[in-house]
Amino acid sequence: MPCGVHHRHLLRECGYRATPQRLMVLDVIRSTDKHLTAEEIHSALQERYPGVDLSTVYRSLRLFVRLGLVEEHKLGGGRRVYEWRTHPDHGHVLCERCGRLEHLEAALLDPIRHTLERAHRYQVRRVTATVFGLCLNCQDTQQ
């Protein structure tokens, strides 16, 4: 099933309308492998569909996060980014100077999951983490 059809079906199944605006927001998120802010998504939409306003983007993002289609990551200082949910459990490394954001592999988070499940008898449903620091380029410019 083509992804546009799948999204339309999923939204309707969950009791939501598959509006053109919602599908456009999904299309922007799916068409990149970057983490995007709501403003960046809005800017990308403005190039193609000038009538879509920022509040529509925010409402759509809240819905997609709730439905599990999109992941929201809070990066401190009120900064939030969104990405298509392709990695079930993963984390991020964020450079505090330049803002570079990279994925942490799920395997690095497995020890946390296993410790919580075994030692604390916790039923872990999802693991995510953000590590803050300086990337190699910013370390080099610091010296």
Image (cartoon, rainbow, N blue to C red):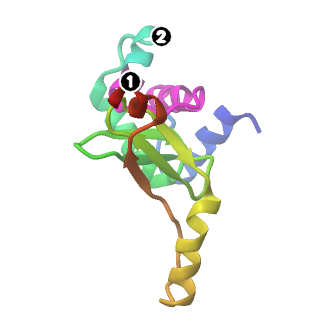
Residue toward you, 3 or 133: 133
Report the residue that reaches farthest toward the front. Answer: 143
Q: Relative to the observer, which residue lies in front, 92 or 84?
A: 92
Q: Give the x, y percent position of residue 21.
A: 44, 27
Residue 104 appears in the figure:
yes
Q: Which mark is residue 15?
A: none
Q: Give x and y (percent) for residue 107.
A: 64, 61
Q: Which mark is on residue 48?
A: 2
Residue at the image position 51 percent from the left and 65 percent from the top: 127
Residue interval drawn in magenta: 20-42
Q: Is residue 121 magenta?
A: no
| Amino acid type, residue under disc 2 in the picture | Arg
In the image, is 100 to the left or to the right of 96? Answer: right
Vertical placement of residue 42 versus 132, above or below = above
Check residue 26 for magenta coloring. yes
SS state under label 2: helix
Query: Does residue 53 sit above or below 72 in this rendering?
Result: above
Residue 64 visible in this rendered orientation of the protein: no
Report the front residue among 65 and 135: 135
Name which residue lies at 36% across and 19% down.
52
Indicate the quadrant containing the C terminus: top left, top right, bottom left or bottom right: top left
> What amino acid type should be assigned to the residue bearing mark 1?
Glu
Q: Earlier in the sequence, mark 1 or mark 2?
A: 1
118 is higher (above) or lower (below) than 114: below
Give the foreground label among 1 and 2. 1
| Residue with the mark numbered 1 | 40
